[in-house]
Amino acid sequence: MFCVECGADGPVYEGLCANCFRKRYPVVKPVEFLDLARCESCGSFRLRSGWSKVDRELVLPQLLRDAMPPLPPYERVGFTQVAREEDANNLAVTVKAVGRFRDLAPVQDFHLRVRIKPSLCDSCQKQRGRYYEGILQVRGEDRELTPGEVRALRTFVVARVDRTESSEAFVSRIEEIHGGLDFYLSKNALAKGIARDVAGSFGGTVSASPKLYGQKEGREVYRVTALVRLAAFRKGDVVRHKGALSEVTSVRPFVVLRDVVSGEERRFKPKDIRGARRIDAERFEARLVRLESGEVAAVHPETAEERPLRTAPKAASRAVVVWTPDGAFLSGLPADTSKD
């Protein structure tokens, strides 16, 4: 076989030798410049497939593939490039396009400019517009949230959203209202998923209610409100449940009550202890003394009042106690439960 262009003997491709084939058939049609939108808020780039939060060096090959498909008769093309910043919004790019046709891999060299266009991605536009679909409400059961719970919940929910891989997951706003917290979230599924996480981590129950918001492309659009009710009691509370005096030693995933007289612990679902009532109590580390009767008593650190302990530790001079109208009892918790 010989080349119909130069007459050279050897393998031919479409009647041409390898050199003549490369000259006649460019791999791609080079462009002078390409525009690349970059989100000013999150730094993601817009490609034909959508916004992508990846490194610029990974974006450029895809940008080139989108803009310059292989010319016939090439079956596919690959790009390598070297980019040099001319300024903050302009890149001078040297490109090598490698075409594939049978066993040929001709290389085409050219230069172009990539112009970075400041923009906002869809997600950041929605955030700035305070867009939301789902609402996560966190309330206490017959009580207001404590300042510590409010701080912990804010941190927990924001961190949970940040760990979500989807670029469309965000917190639109957070409001403290009626002794609780409202989180406005970008997706209904996000609100329901985080509601389950909050209930599991802080102890509580979850309910969800959808509300028709409107229509989009002929389909009904709903906004879901997910409500988490945290247990009526907090760790360290002293309650009376079915006649027994108990301290709350845990609230997640179940409420655990420890009988202050017997020391026995039992766990309950939050709904099963709605009849329990909190009583006034103090918890502190007390000095222990032995009375003339032989009983061991706890001494209140402020009033110096002495009260016998129903159960007393052996050979101990101090212990953490709960001080209640019913008497003093050994506690199963540290004096400061906020540090436990």
Image (cartoon, rainbow, N blue to C red):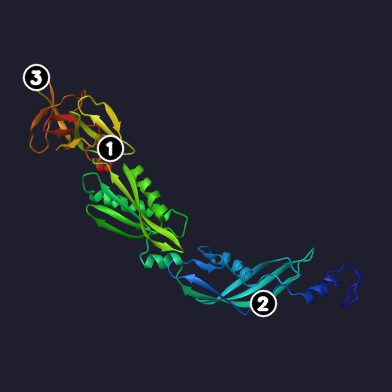
213 left or right of 276 in image:
right
Q: Which amino acid is tagged 1?
A: Lys
Residue depicted at x 37% and y 46% = 196
Determine which residue is flagged by label 2. 30
Q: CA–CA distance between discs 3 and 2?
A: 101 Å
- Secondary structure of the residue carrying numbered label 1: helix
Determine which residue is flagged by label 3. 293
Badge 1: how crowded within 10 Å, few (<14), some, or many (20+)?
Answer: few
Residue 320 or residue 58, whichever sits in front = 58
Are circles 3 and 2 on residues that touch, CB within 8 Å? no
Sequence order check: which comes first, mark 1 or mark 2? 2
Q: Which amino acid is tagged 3?
A: Ser
Residue depicted at x 21% and y 46% = 143
- Look at the image and tell me whether residue 130 can be seen: yes
Residue depicted at x 25% and y 43% = 338
* Quarter occupied by the N terminus: bottom right
Determine which residue is flagged by label 1. 271
Sequence order check: which comes first, mark 1 or mark 3? 1
* Image x and y of residue 329, in percent: 17, 29
* Image x and y of residue 304, in percent: 8, 34
- Determine which quarter of the picture holds residue 313: top left
Are circles 1 and 3 on residues that touch, CB within 8 Å? no
Q: Which amino acid is tagged 2?
A: Pro
Give the foreground label among 3 and 2.
2
Residue depicted at x 56% and y 65% = 49
Q: Which mark is residue 149?
A: none
Q: Residue furthest top?
A: 293
Badge 2: how crowded within 10 Å, few (<14), some, or many (20+)?
Answer: some
Badge 3: how crowded within 10 Å, few (<14), some, or many (20+)?
Answer: few
- Look at the image and tell me whether residue 250 can be seen: no
1 left or right of 101 in image:
right
